Image (cartoon, rainbow, N blue to C red):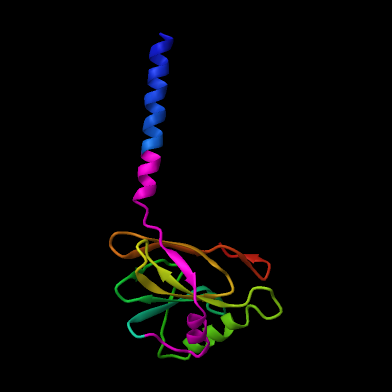
């Protein structure tokens, strides 16, 4: 009887490990790469062609500005879209630009890439982005920062 239990436990353990590893190989996680040109483009209020812009946080205190290439979709309620034709775009960037004043973490720019390294968009914030999860329909389904900005955890 003990031999049958050992075989059963071995099969279950193998199955768990197999499914866990197969899930890793089908991951949709992209990455973010630091880019000083992205920082400069935001700080000069440049609007990239074929991009939609969003902010993260309250409109009075945004924590990040994100530009997503139009072939991708950012449909997360925590990222309201910005009307780049209004004065809001410049105002929101100005607020984000002040985040790092007197702080060790100044706002910085990042390129957002999908799991194969294709360009998805840009991120500007003193909060460092942690990960981006993009599904097979080119929809960003998870996206968020990883560190504390001015003593407030914004995860």
Q: Is residue 34 above or below residue 83?
A: above
**For residue 83, side relative to residue 104 (left or right):** left
User: For the point 33% across and 59% down, which residue is it?
Assistant: 135
Q: Is residue 82 above or below residue 129?
A: below
**For residue 149, side relative to residue 121 (left or right):** right
User: For the point 69% across and 75% down, which residue is it?
Assistant: 103
Residue 130 image point, x, y percent: 51, 62
Residue located farthest toward the right when viewing the structure as drawn: 102
Q: Nearer the viewer, residue 82 or 34?
A: 34
Q: Is residue 15 magenta?
A: no
Q: Is residue 18 above or below residue 6?
A: below
Q: Nearer the viewer, residue 76 or 48?
A: 48
Residue located farthest toward the top when viewing the structure as drawn: 1
Q: Is residue 23 magenta?
A: yes
**Rendering quarter of residue 16:** top left
**Badge count:** 0
Residue 98 image point, x, y percent: 62, 82
Residue 121 image point, x, y percent: 40, 74
The quarter in which the C terminus is drawn is bottom right
User: For the point 48% across and 91% down, which residue is it?
Assistant: 87
Q: Which stretch did the figure color magenta?
A: 19-48
The quarter in which the N terminus is drawn is top left
**For residue 69, side relative to residue 46 (left or right):** left
Q: Is residue 3 above or below residue 76?
A: above
Residue 146 image point, x, y percent: 56, 62
User: For the point 38% across and 20% down, which residue is it?
Assistant: 8
């Amino acid at each position: 009887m003990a031999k049958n239990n050992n075989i059963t436990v071995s099969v279950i353990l193998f199955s768990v490990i197999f499914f866990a590893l197969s899930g890793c190989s089908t991951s949709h996680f992209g990455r973010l790469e630091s880019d000083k040109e992205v920082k400069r483009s935001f700080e000069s209020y440049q609007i990239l062609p074929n991009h939609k812009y969003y902010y993260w946080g309250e409109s009075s205190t945004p924590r990040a500005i994100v530009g997503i290439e139009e072939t991708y979709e950012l449909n997360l309620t925590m990222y309201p879209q910005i009307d780049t034709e209004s004065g809001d775009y410049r105002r929101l960037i100005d607020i984000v630009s002040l985040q790092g004043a007197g702080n060790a973490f100044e706002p910085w720019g990042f390129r957002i890439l999908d799991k194969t390294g294709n360009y998805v968009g840009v991120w500007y914030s003193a909060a460092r982005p942690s990960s981006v999860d993009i599904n097979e329909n080119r929809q960003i389904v998870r996206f968020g920062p990883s560190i504390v900005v001015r003593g407030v955890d914004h995860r």
